[in-house]
Image (cartoon, rainbow, N blue to C red):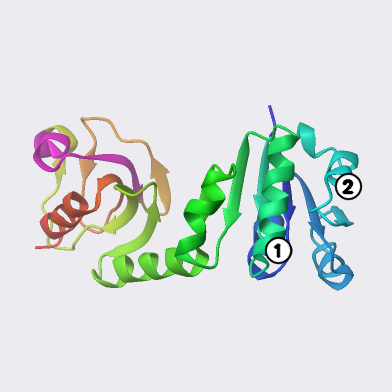
Amino acid sequence: MKKNFIVIGLGRFGSNVAITLAETNSDVLAVDVDKDAVKSVSKKVPHCVIADATNLDVLTELGAGSIDHAVVAIGNNLEASILTIVNLKKLNVKNITVRADEEGHKELFKLIGATEVIIPEENAAVFLANQIKSDSIIDYYIIDKDYVMVKINVGKKFISKTLAELNIRNEFDVNIVGIVRNDEFRIPHGTDYICANDVVVVAGKNPNILRLDQFFNK
């Protein structure tokens, strides 16, 4: 069943979230008090509304109570973010992701009902630092505070072996969830080979993945 979303606040972050959801054929309603922001996003998001999400009656009229997931991306207006989160909780929205501009706001937003709080600049910095510290790590996704998923280029000197022979899960305590070869993705089995110049998709704890990266690129 297709999920539906509401994105409240259409600055750079909120706009990108709304547009990306729309491009993946999700049902998304984009909301902002600024008509120019709404007009800009409406070119790529079919359902856009000029509205004040700090008003409970307005959110009710928009049908926010039936939304699967709300994204509050108001940004530098702390009071508006707080009121919007409280309103969404009153409407029993179960999943509320909130953008925060400061670390100190994270706990506050969670206390009043946010299920997830992110600081975009912080996430981007962590992504960049982990990506550039290894020439062979080409993509990096944070799953939670302990676990990540990455793409690793296998070095050209690596000697081909099967996953069963490598015993990577036991040796490194990570899971290889995909292999990309000749631009084709496959879900691996124990009899599949990992070869030089493959790209492997790996999930696990960051230190263990770094050890695996060194193993593939001695």
Q: Position of residue 191 (x, y in %)?
A: 21, 30
Q: Is residue 35 above or below residue 53?
A: below
Amino acid identity at mark 2? Val
Check disc 2 and report the residue beneath it: 58
Q: Position of residue 124 (x, y in %)?
A: 44, 67
Left-right relation of 165 to 176:
left
Q: Position of residue 48 (x, y in %)?
A: 85, 55
Does the rendering let one see residue 22?
no
Question: Label 1 neighbourhood size at 10 Å, few (<14), some (14-19), many (20+)?
Answer: many
**Labels 2, 1: front one:** 2
Left-right relation of 121 to 74:
left
Which label sits on residue 132?
A: none
Amino acid identity at mark 1? Ser
Is 174 part of what is drawn in magenta? Answer: yes
Q: Position of residue 206 (x, y in %)?
A: 24, 53
Residue at point 21% right, 46% down? Answer: 194
Foreground residue, 201 or 63?
63
Foreground residue, 172 or 71?
71
The span shown in magenta is: 165-180
Foreground residue, 143 or 56?
56
Is 79 part of what is drawn in magenta? Answer: no
Q: Is residue 140 above or below residue 205?
A: below
SS label for mark 1: helix
Check disc 1 and report the residue beneath it: 15
Q: Quadrant of the N terminus?
A: top right
Residue at point 64% right, 64% down? Answer: 78
Residue at point 79% right, 39% down? Answer: 64
